[in-house]
Amino acid sequence: MNSSKYKFALVAAMAALALNASADQGKGGMSDMGGMKMDNMGNQSTKTTKRTFGDNEAEVKAVDKAKKSITLNHGPIKSKTVEMPPMTMAFTVSDTAMLSNVKAGDKVKFTIENVDNAPMVTSLTVQK
Protein backbone atom coordinates (compact mmCIF):
# COMPACT_ATOMS: atom_id res chain seq x y z
CA MET A 1 0.00 0.00 0.00
CA ASN A 2 2.83 2.42 0.81
CA SER A 3 4.31 1.69 -2.61
CA SER A 4 1.10 2.85 -4.31
CA LYS A 5 1.13 6.15 -2.44
CA TYR A 6 4.72 6.84 -3.50
CA LYS A 7 3.96 6.00 -7.14
CA PHE A 8 0.92 8.27 -7.06
CA ALA A 9 2.95 11.10 -5.49
CA LEU A 10 5.70 10.64 -8.11
CA VAL A 11 3.21 10.71 -11.01
CA ALA A 12 1.48 13.79 -9.56
CA ALA A 13 4.81 15.61 -9.13
CA MET A 14 5.86 14.82 -12.70
CA ALA A 15 2.52 16.03 -14.03
CA ALA A 16 2.87 19.28 -12.07
CA LEU A 17 6.38 19.81 -13.48
CA ALA A 18 5.17 19.15 -17.03
CA LEU A 19 2.32 21.66 -16.63
CA ASN A 20 4.70 24.25 -15.18
CA ALA A 21 7.17 23.80 -18.06
CA SER A 22 4.35 24.11 -20.58
CA ALA A 23 3.11 27.32 -18.94
CA ASP A 24 6.64 28.79 -18.93
CA GLN A 25 6.98 28.17 -22.67
CA GLY A 26 3.74 30.00 -23.36
CA LYS A 27 4.70 33.16 -21.47
CA GLY A 28 6.90 34.66 -24.18
CA GLY A 29 5.52 32.70 -27.08
CA MET A 30 3.91 35.49 -29.11
CA SER A 31 6.23 38.30 -28.01
CA ASP A 32 9.43 36.83 -29.45
CA MET A 33 8.77 35.31 -32.85
CA GLY A 34 12.30 35.75 -34.21
CA GLY A 35 11.47 38.12 -37.06
CA MET A 36 8.70 36.01 -38.54
CA LYS A 37 6.37 37.73 -40.98
CA MET A 38 2.91 37.71 -39.47
CA ASP A 39 0.99 39.46 -42.28
CA ASN A 40 -1.54 36.80 -43.18
CA MET A 41 -2.25 35.30 -39.79
CA GLY A 42 -5.87 34.89 -38.68
CA ASN A 43 -7.65 36.81 -35.94
CA GLN A 44 -7.26 40.20 -37.60
CA SER A 45 -9.46 42.97 -36.32
CA THR A 46 -12.08 44.39 -38.64
CA LYS A 47 -10.15 47.66 -38.71
CA THR A 48 -6.82 46.88 -40.36
CA THR A 49 -4.40 49.20 -42.08
CA LYS A 50 -2.55 47.78 -45.04
CA ARG A 51 0.65 49.41 -46.19
CA THR A 52 1.29 49.48 -49.87
CA PHE A 53 4.79 49.36 -51.24
CA GLY A 54 6.17 52.87 -51.62
CA ASP A 55 4.51 54.00 -48.40
CA ASN A 56 7.83 53.98 -46.57
CA GLU A 57 8.54 57.47 -45.22
CA ALA A 58 11.82 59.09 -44.26
CA GLU A 59 13.74 62.31 -43.77
CA VAL A 60 16.77 62.75 -46.01
CA LYS A 61 19.96 63.20 -43.99
CA ALA A 62 22.47 63.24 -46.86
CA VAL A 63 22.71 62.81 -50.62
CA ASP A 64 25.89 61.53 -52.31
CA LYS A 65 25.51 61.55 -56.09
CA ALA A 66 29.09 60.33 -56.60
CA LYS A 67 28.43 57.21 -54.54
CA LYS A 68 24.87 56.89 -55.89
CA SER A 69 23.52 56.83 -52.34
CA ILE A 70 21.07 58.55 -50.02
CA THR A 71 21.07 58.52 -46.22
CA LEU A 72 17.57 58.24 -44.78
CA ASN A 73 16.22 58.50 -41.26
CA HIS A 74 13.30 56.15 -41.84
CA GLY A 75 10.46 54.56 -39.97
CA PRO A 76 9.70 50.85 -40.21
CA ILE A 77 10.31 49.59 -43.75
CA LYS A 78 8.18 46.95 -45.40
CA SER A 79 8.44 45.92 -49.02
CA LYS A 80 8.16 42.71 -51.01
CA THR A 81 11.73 41.74 -50.11
CA VAL A 82 12.86 43.97 -47.22
CA GLU A 83 11.68 44.51 -43.65
CA MET A 84 13.62 46.80 -41.29
CA PRO A 85 13.01 48.57 -38.02
CA PRO A 86 13.33 52.37 -37.84
CA MET A 87 16.91 53.68 -38.18
CA THR A 88 19.17 56.06 -40.08
CA MET A 89 21.02 54.32 -42.91
CA ALA A 90 22.66 55.00 -46.26
CA PHE A 91 21.10 53.21 -49.24
CA THR A 92 22.23 52.82 -52.83
CA VAL A 93 19.71 54.07 -55.39
CA SER A 94 18.84 52.19 -58.56
CA ASP A 95 18.97 55.37 -60.66
CA THR A 96 21.11 58.43 -59.89
CA ALA A 97 18.43 60.64 -61.49
CA MET A 98 16.35 60.09 -58.33
CA LEU A 99 18.89 62.17 -56.43
CA SER A 100 18.65 65.26 -58.66
CA ASN A 101 15.66 66.86 -56.89
CA VAL A 102 16.28 65.81 -53.31
CA LYS A 103 18.33 67.42 -50.53
CA ALA A 104 19.03 66.98 -46.82
CA GLY A 105 15.95 67.81 -44.75
CA ASP A 106 13.42 66.74 -47.40
CA LYS A 107 10.62 64.37 -46.43
CA VAL A 108 10.32 61.51 -48.90
CA LYS A 109 8.29 58.41 -49.68
CA PHE A 110 10.25 55.54 -51.12
CA THR A 111 10.29 51.93 -52.18
CA ILE A 112 13.16 49.67 -51.29
CA GLU A 113 13.95 46.18 -52.56
CA ASN A 114 16.66 43.60 -52.03
CA VAL A 115 18.99 43.78 -55.04
CA ASP A 116 22.11 41.59 -55.03
CA ASN A 117 21.63 40.94 -51.29
CA ALA A 118 21.57 44.63 -50.40
CA PRO A 119 18.65 47.02 -49.80
CA MET A 120 18.31 49.47 -52.73
CA VAL A 121 15.96 52.42 -53.16
CA THR A 122 13.99 51.74 -56.34
CA SER A 123 11.63 54.73 -56.20
CA LEU A 124 11.78 58.05 -54.39
CA THR A 125 9.28 60.89 -54.20
CA VAL A 126 9.83 64.19 -52.38
CA GLN A 127 6.79 65.15 -50.27
CA LYS A 128 5.58 68.75 -50.49
Image (cartoon, rainbow, N blue to C red):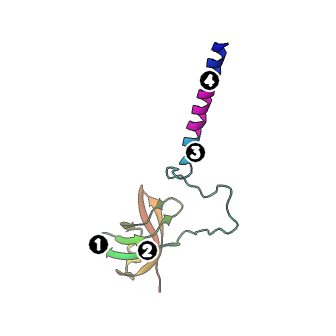
Q: Viewer-nearest of labels 1 and 4?
A: 4
Tell me the kind of residue under disc 4: Ala
Q: Any mark on residue 26, and which?
A: 3
Real-space Cα separation, disc 4 to disc 3, in angstroms: 26 Å
Q: What residue occupies the far front of the structure in this picture?
A: 2
Real-space Cα separation, disc 1 to disc 4, in angstroms: 76 Å
On the image, numbered disc 1 is attached to which residue?
A: 66
Tell me the kind of residue under disc 3: Gly
**Location of residue 8 with respect to 108 vertically, above or below:** above
On the image, numbered disc 4 is attached to which residue?
A: 9
Label 4 SS: helix
On the image, numbered disc 2 is attached to which residue?
A: 58
Q: Nearer the viewer, residue 125 or 18?
A: 18
- Sequence-earlier tag: 1 or 2: 2
Magenta residues, start to end: 12-22
Quadrant housing the N terminus: top right
**Location of residue 68 with respect to 13 vertically, above or below:** below
